[in-house]
Amino acid sequence: MSEKFSRRDFLKLAGVGAATSAILTGCGPASRYVKREPYMQMPEYNYNGQSTYYATTCRECAAGCGLIVRTVQGRAIKTEGNAGNPLNLGKTCARGQATLHGLYNPDRVTDPQKRSSRGSGSTQVMDWDAAIQVVADALKNNKPEEIAFLMGMAPDHLFDLVSDLASATGMNAPLRFGALGMFEARATLSKAAENLFGEASLPFFDVGGAQVVFSFGANFLETWLSPVSYTRGFAGLREAKTKMRGKFVQFESRMSQTGGKADEWIPLRPGTEALVALAIGKLASEIRGGAMPRAFENVDPIDTASKSGIKLETLEHLAGMFAGSNGALAIPGGPALGQSNGLAVAEAVLALNAISDNFGKPGGVYLSPLAPNQSEYQRPASAQEMQEFVQKMADGKIKVLFVHGVNPLFELPTALGFGGASKSVSQIISFATFPDETAREADYVFPDHHGLESWGYQRVATGSAQPVLSGAQPVVSPYYNTRATVDVLITAAQLAGGSFASALPFKDEVEFLNGKVSALMGEVDGSISAPDLATFMAYFQQHGGYWKNSDERVAPKAGDALNREISAEEAEFAGEGEFFFVPFVSPTLAEAGANKPWLQELPDPTTTVMWNTWVEMNPETAHELGIENDDVVRIVSEAGELEVPVYLYPAIRPDTIAIPFGQGHTAYGRYAENRGVNPADLLGQHFNEAGDLAFAGMKVKVEKTGVKKPLSRLESIMGVYGIGLGEEH
Amino acid sequence: MVTLSDLKISEVKLGEEQTGKWGMVIDQDICTGCQACVAACAMENNITFVGEEDSGYGRSMHWIRIERFWEGEYPEVKMTANQPMLCQQCGHATCEPVCPAFATVHSQAEQLNLQVYNRCVGTRYCANNCPYQVRSFNWRDYQRPEPLPNQFNPDVTVRRMGVMEKCTFCIQRIHKAQDKAKSEGREVADGEFTTACAQACPANAITFGRVDDPESMVSQLAKRSHGVKHLEELGTLPNVTYFKGG
């Protein structure tokens, strides 16, 4: 401060300052009168209009759970389970809850698009008339046998429409595929049921009524077949209302979320599942007495113990547990079936049930009832059938490929070569709701509505004692310029004329649906009945579908399930490497959840990792190799390689590593893209006898990279704050 | 509508008997850790996601989380029973007396620990003092790009940066049910409504209801001999009872 600056000057200046600040605060006199909301005005204490509720069907997987969606002013706010639907009885899984993050996802396909070149991000918006003309031309200008539809496992009404179209015109019958079906080994399950019971059907395991459950790899509390229904069954097993608390034993090399709930977790050597099942069968039969069944004759428990790594005493104890119970149930599933001997595993485990003679009895094995409008069980394509299809594409026998509800470039093993084969297809038209990998490789994307904006129905394949047809209706009007694929096909078929037009003589999707559902009007013992179609359809939508009131599960004919030889061969493993490789479906993301941000932020139930992919490794093994948590390693299989951070997982065999499937997208929106890796890149082309992929039948190498990538996990902040990196911050 | 007298800070002294009003029973033996409750809670209560980096720093906003621990070493390793952990709505909550802004207050009407967002100044004392570690703080204004906000529940405040939040026992559902019952001249029936987590749970592991009504399902369950309350020895009087697994 200079000497000339007097006290008077200072006061002047200060006065100006004070005036300025007065003006500044004064510029908002209104702000003084902003009503400060007292806390009793919080929305939690007020009514904000009335809600409306609509029944529909969840499309996050193909199980067909009923939903009730709460909407306010045309916006979908919350999904709840439909308490009337016999499959899920008012309950949902995490994916069902997060389906709204799909509906209001910021990265949906908003308009019909023409892509400038395959794989490029540059697209041109079309109007729907032009889009439908493209579909009509594709139908009309190609031979029917050169047109193919590749579809997901939902929705069924679209599958029925395309099936009708195909059978009337000579087009290829639509092929259905889903990664969940592949990892569930659905083809193996139904083939084993055919071999043992003479009927290719999906078995239903009444976990809730059992006393002892032996699960060989079946991850029935996660994504397997119908997880909400099986979780209810599990609660029934545990709850001691009318019976003792049931016991649960899980056989698997890597502890799954399901295995974490087991009383006893048996980490057998991968590939020895059939052997172990048969040895337990033999020991249990000895305890029960009588003639030794043929199925168990040739197995040696002592030899089994050494091959499987399970102590003989443990085998005997388990056999005693199985034989000593009146309600013992054995379930085959998951990685146990995804091996070269998967069919033998399924048969051996299913045959165990003959010891407790539980076929068609409470707590036992049933065959799932067919849905009300179904004449025979249709399973999705096995990986081998997909391989044949890809070969057909590569040979140029497919000129036009329509894709709906499935993302083969992500879900199929890369080694199957879908990407390369698609180059031989002249025209690929995708109906994807989201910009997924396959849509990016398509010439056109004609987006279907989101499931919550759609009409339709889904047949419940398994999980309910009653036959169920879950009905879907739009709960909100379409948010974007999308159009129902059924409507697109109906209009295009009429434009194409000829047999196409006569195959689909409908005004729109609703008329088509009415025709399909009205066949149920004449049936007795249904959940709804009405004298006229309009009322019947109104009830159908109001109640979220149609189901029979009676238990129509089928008792399997298991006369000689044990009177046949079952192979006890161990599985063969492909590739060079010291580790067995177990890919498993992420319980929270499943195959299509990665673009929903709240699913990304759900901690994995076993590792608590969020937003990424990890590889699980036994801490002892890692220690020997000098690998720590969050070290990025390179996994090399015969088919490919990828780099992924390590999670030291205490419940995995020292000779096994495991990677979740669900991340590793290169497209599919901001929340999914460039996040984690896709274990499908490591899978080779090896199949079991039923045609399912031997996804758990590989050996891989692990190499250090010297890089660290801290994983976000709920359980601990170790690694994230730089712990172990030498840079605490 | 809530009146001021309902909102009086609890005058209950430590050690005095207090029954609570709303409570929960969680059966860890049947909880499968599937995260349906976590997702349902997030959707009902407008809880934001924070992304990979912030969640790695422990800033995720889960109002309910599933804890699991490991016991033993391979091959005798065991995963402990999944433990859903949420605000225990303590009768003597340790979060309450430390709040300088009276944002963390005890409601006389509902016997719940309220979080008044527009009083909260973000000292985070309450979270530091919560023995259950169930409070989460909005470290940022997390982005929910359009059209995701279409999903917001209009009954629940959307919180912003600098505000603490936690499980409310779905207080908006409590009020709706009470208002409906009042307009029909009756009491709220047991099981007439439930919280979002309990409604979603596929295993039915969560039961919610009136703990001051001895006939209610939740009271009947809580009487079972194997029920425990977490950190009861601290004198917090939690209103959530757990059945241990196994």
Image (cartoon, rainbow, N blue to C red):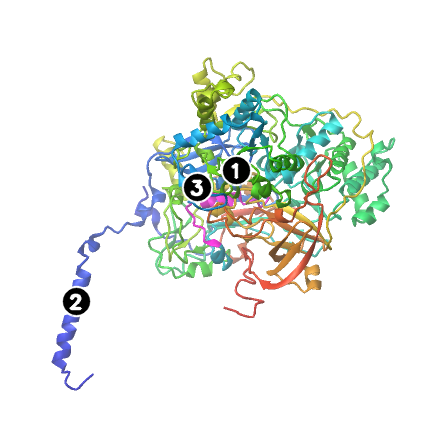
Secondary structure category for the residue under label 1: loop
- Residue drawn at x 51%, y 16% as measured from the top left: A521
Q: Viewer-nearest of labels 3 and 2?
A: 3
- Mark 3 crowdedness (10 Å alpha carbons): few <14, some 14-19, many ≥20: many
Of labels 2 and 1, earlier in sequence is: 2
Of labels 3 and 2, earlier in sequence is: 2
Judging by the rendered image, the residue that carries numbered circle 1 is A60
Q: Please give the chain letter of the residue carrying mark 3.
A: A
Magenta-span inclusion, residue B50: yes
Which disc, if any, is residue A515?
none
Q: What stretch is highlighted in magenta?
A: B32-51
Judging by the rendered image, the residue that carries numbered circle 3 is A108
Which disc, if any, is residue A20?
2
Q: Are marks 2 and 1 on the same chain?
A: yes
- Mark 1 crowdedness (10 Å alpha carbons): few <14, some 14-19, many ≥20: many
- Against A162, residue B99 (above or below) is below
- Residue type beneath disc 3: Arg
- Against A147, residue B84 (above or below) is below
